[in-house]
Image (tube, grey):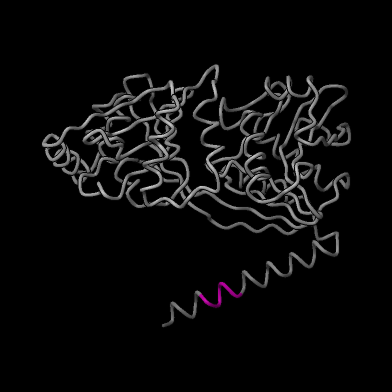
Amino acid sequence: MLVNVADCDVHIVPLNRLNSSQIFWLESHKKHEVFGALSWFQNITRFEVETKNLQNDNFLMLFVKQGNAAILAVPLFSKNGRISLISNFYTPAQFIFFDSSVLNEETAWSLFIHLLHDNRLQWNRLYLPEMSSSQLETIQSASDKFSGALYFIEHTKNYSVEFDNFQAYWQQRPSIIKNTISRKYKQLKKRAYTVVIKSNIDAKDREDYWAVYANSWKCSEPNCNFINWLMTEHYKNADVYIGFVYIDDIPTAAQLWIFNAGVASIFKLAQDKKFDPLSPGSILTYEMIQHAANNQIRKIDFLLGSDPFKELWMNEKSPIYNVEMFNINTLSGKLLSLLQKLKTFMKLILRKAFRHD
C-alpha cells in the first residue's frame, strides 16, 4: 500500500452535516458521475430514512486524511457496532471517493479495511453489499492480514455487452430475439403505436412512467421520491433518458437509462401486463440500444439482476457478491461470526441432503 495507515487520521461526519469544503472535496473526487456522486448517496439516505424509520445520524461519511489533505471518503450506515456501506442497491459495484493522485481503487479499499482493524473504529460487523469480483478480491487480500472472519456469497449477476456499432451488436444476437423483434413489429404495425425516447423528463413523462409501473410485474416502490429525483436531476457529464412505447396513446412500456462516459446503464424497466402479448418492452429495449449506439455509446450495462432474458441481449455475465466481515477481537463480533459459520454449515448440509434426494 502506498499510504502508511499510521500517518492517517479518521474523521466521521453525519452525511447531513457536511460542511462546504467537505462537499467540494466529495464532488471533486467522485468516481462515477451518477452512481458515485454525493447527491446519489444523499438521496438513498433520504429514501431509507423515509421508508424504514431510520435516523439521519446513522448515515455517515468516513473521511481519511493524510496530513491536512483528505485522500479517502466512504459513505457508511452505522448502528450498534454494525457498519455497512450506504448501498447503491442498483449498481454492480460500490463507489467510494478517493484522491487518484494518492490511491487507486484497490489501494483505497485496502486502506479502508486496514483502518477498520487499526482499533480506531468501534465495530463488530461490516456488511459490503453488491461487490464486484475485483472488489471482493481486494477485500479478501486486505483481510488476510488480520484476525477476522470474512464470508461472502454470490448475490446476483451483472449482464453487459460491448460493441463498435449497432449493426455489429445486432448481428451477435441469438435468432430467438431477432425473430421475436421482427414478429412483434409486424403485430404492432396493425395498431397505432409510437416510440418516444428523450432526456428532458417532464411531469407528464413521470406520470406515464408510474402508470406503466403500476400495471407491470414490478413490486410496488415504498415511495416514488428516489426515482423522481433521478428523473429530474441534472448532471454535467451524464444524461438520464426515458423511453416509452405508446399503443393507442396508452403508455405500455417504460424504461429509464443513464448515459455516462460511453456506457448506457439500464436502470429501470416496466411493461403493462395487459400488453404482454405485443412485447412492447422488448421493442423499447431494441429501440433504446439503437438510440444509445447512435449517440456514441459502446457498452450497455444491465446493472443488477439474474433474469434469464438478459442473456438474449448481453454477452458478458459477471457474479456480484455480498460480503460480511466480523471483528473477532470483540465478543459480539466473535459471536456473530460463530452464528454465521453455523448458518453456512447448515446451508451446506441442506444442500447435500437435497442433492442426495
Residue 40 location, quadrant:
top right
Task: Name the image quarter holding the C terminus.
Answer: bottom left
Quadrant including the N terminus: top right
Check residue 348 for magenta coloring: yes
* The image quarter in which residue 45 lies: top right
**Residue 8's image quarter?**
top right
* Residue at the (78%, 24%) spot, across then down: 22
115 displayed left or right of 131: right
**Front-lying residue, 247 or 317:** 247
29, above or below 13, in the image: above
Badge count? 0
The residue depicted at 17 percent of the width and 41 percent of the height is: 184
Tell me the magenta residue range: 346-350
Q: Main secondary structure of the magenta part?
A: helix
State the residue at coordinates (38%, 41%): 211
Q: Where is residue 276 shown, x and y percent of the image? A: 25, 49
Q: Position of residue 127 (x, y in %)?
A: 68, 52
